[in-house]
């Protein structure tokens, strides 16, 4: 066997040492993932995420605290919750692969949850006003009933102000504004090696698992918040995520009679078909997109809308019933659904399942290839 020179021997030993260090880091991937190798398609994934971060930057300034009162008065106008939902959906999507996204997800979710709680208080008050208006138009109330109605409205107005104060404190404490720039930087570095070959199979698999979870998980529909509403939440993430992906999943209009579930074509022109989640903008079609049928999306959106209306009605009635109860610091919520609410929700769920829209969407996603 030929003898190695001293320099060659030293080089070989050094190489072995470096390789051993890299192997030792394989579990944590700290060294390897800090400067990922660029792959074609990385820029599309990075842009997809940064487009969801950027609209929030002027709303949540990093250098100063949110001007709470003007923010809350204009948040609906700015559609802040929609932007938060879109960003949250992508952070949820990729967190299973990139664990360091989890703290950023929690920041976004905390603010979105706070806005949701305040919106619930506002909606409860509006529900009561609309309910009493219809009641009084049907039959003029006597003095006692009118006084009772006014007490309920006054109570809900107090709870709305309480919810407003809670949200104000949350926004004052929130560090979301200072978190957006680091999140943007993190996305730019970590996803630099995340090209088509990784992104398309991963997103496809995650969306399929989301649909499978909705279909197979046993939700207790005797519970309003943790059953009926939780089922709706999980189902809702599918159209929200398609919207947030902004072109990685394209929505196609099948010719008449070509919908994978022909019966769903009857939904054309319905409120569900006109809903914005049935018509996502998808302004940046990906180089390697997945494609799904819009008619299948109609059924998903219809179920989300139907159960949402049921949930709003149930929570509105509860808010009216407990308007004068200030034992808790929040507008009353209940985890118990009435038998009638349970039955209605089960009909809506079964309609979705019997349509096999979820299975058809899963099958269409299977054909996606990078």
Image: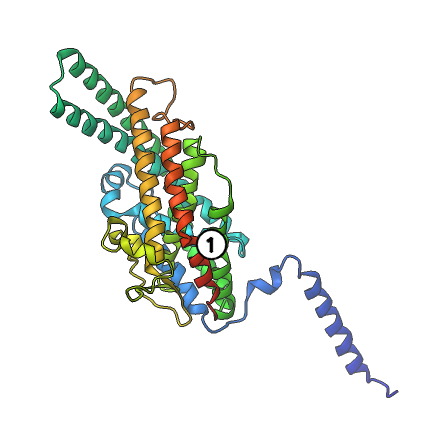
Q: Which residue is mark 1?
A: 93
User: Which residue lies most toward the top here?
Assistant: 144
Q: Which residue is more in the foreground, 255 or 62?
A: 255
Point out residue 165 in the picture as x, y percentages from the top left corner.
31, 29
Count of number-bearing discs: 1
The picture quadrant where one finds residue 226 is top left
Point out residue 353 in the picture as x, y percentages from the top left corner.
42, 48
Point out residue 101 in the picture as x, y percentages from the top left corner.
49, 52
Work out whether residue 318 can be spotted. yes
Q: Quadrant of the N terminus?
A: bottom right
Image point 75% across, 72% down: which residue? 16
Image point 34% across, 18% down: which residue? 326
Point out residue 171 in the picture as x, y percentages from the top left corner.
35, 38
Image point 34% across, 38% down: which residue? 116
Residue 260 in the image: above or below residue 91: below
Q: Secondary structure at mark 1?
A: helix
Q: Which residue is more in the foreground, 277 or 104?
A: 277
Q: Which residue is more in the foreground, 358 or 77?
A: 358
Residue 7 in the image: above or below residue 252: below
């Amino acid at each position: 066997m030929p003898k190695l020179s001293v320099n060659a021997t030293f080089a070989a030993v050094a190489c072995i040492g470096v390789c051993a260090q890299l192997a030792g880091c394989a579990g944590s991937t700290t060294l390897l993932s800090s400067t990922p190798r660029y792959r074609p398609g990385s820029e599309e994934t990075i842009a997809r995420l940064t487009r969801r971060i950027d609209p929030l930057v002027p709303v949540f300034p990093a250098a100063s605290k949110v001007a709470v009162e003007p923010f809350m008065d204009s948040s609906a106008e700015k559609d802040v919750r929609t932007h938060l939902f879109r960003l949250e959906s992508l952070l949820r999507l990729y967190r299973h692969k990139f664990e360091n996204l989890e703290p950023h997800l929690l920041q976004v979710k905390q603010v979105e949850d706070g806005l949701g709680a305040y919106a619930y208080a506002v909606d409860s008050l509006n529900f009561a006003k609309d309910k009493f208006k219809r009641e009084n138009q049907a039959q003029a109330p006597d003095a006692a009933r009118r006084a009772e109605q006014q007490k309920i409205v006054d109570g809900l107005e107090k709870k709305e102000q309480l919810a407003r104060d809670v949200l104000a404190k949350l926004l004052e404490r929130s560090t979301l504004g200072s978190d957006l720039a680091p999140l943007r930087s993190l996305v730019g570095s970590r996803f630099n090696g995340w090209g088509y070959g990784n992104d398309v199979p991963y997103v496809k698999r995650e969306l399929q698992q989301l649909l499978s979870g909705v279909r197979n998980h046993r939700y207790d529909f005797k519970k309003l918040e943790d059953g009926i509403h939780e089922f709706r939440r999980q189902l809702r993430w599918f159209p929200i995520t398609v919207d947030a992906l902004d072109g990685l999943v394209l929505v196609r209009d099948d010719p008449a009679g070509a919908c994978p579930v022909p019966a769903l074509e009857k939904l054309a022109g319905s409120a569900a078909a006109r809903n914005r989640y049935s018509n996502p903008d998808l302004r940046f079609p990906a180089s390697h997109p997945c494609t799904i049928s819009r008619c299948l999306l109609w059924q998903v959106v219809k179920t989300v809308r139907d159960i949402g209306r049921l949930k709003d009605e149930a929570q509105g009635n509860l808010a009216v019933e407990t308007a004068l109860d200030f034992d808790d610091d929040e507008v009353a919520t209940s985890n118990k659904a009435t038998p009638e609410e349970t039955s209605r929700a089960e009909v809506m769920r079964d309609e979705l399942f019997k349509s096999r829209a979820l299975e058809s969407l899963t099958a269409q996603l299977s054909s996606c290839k990078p």
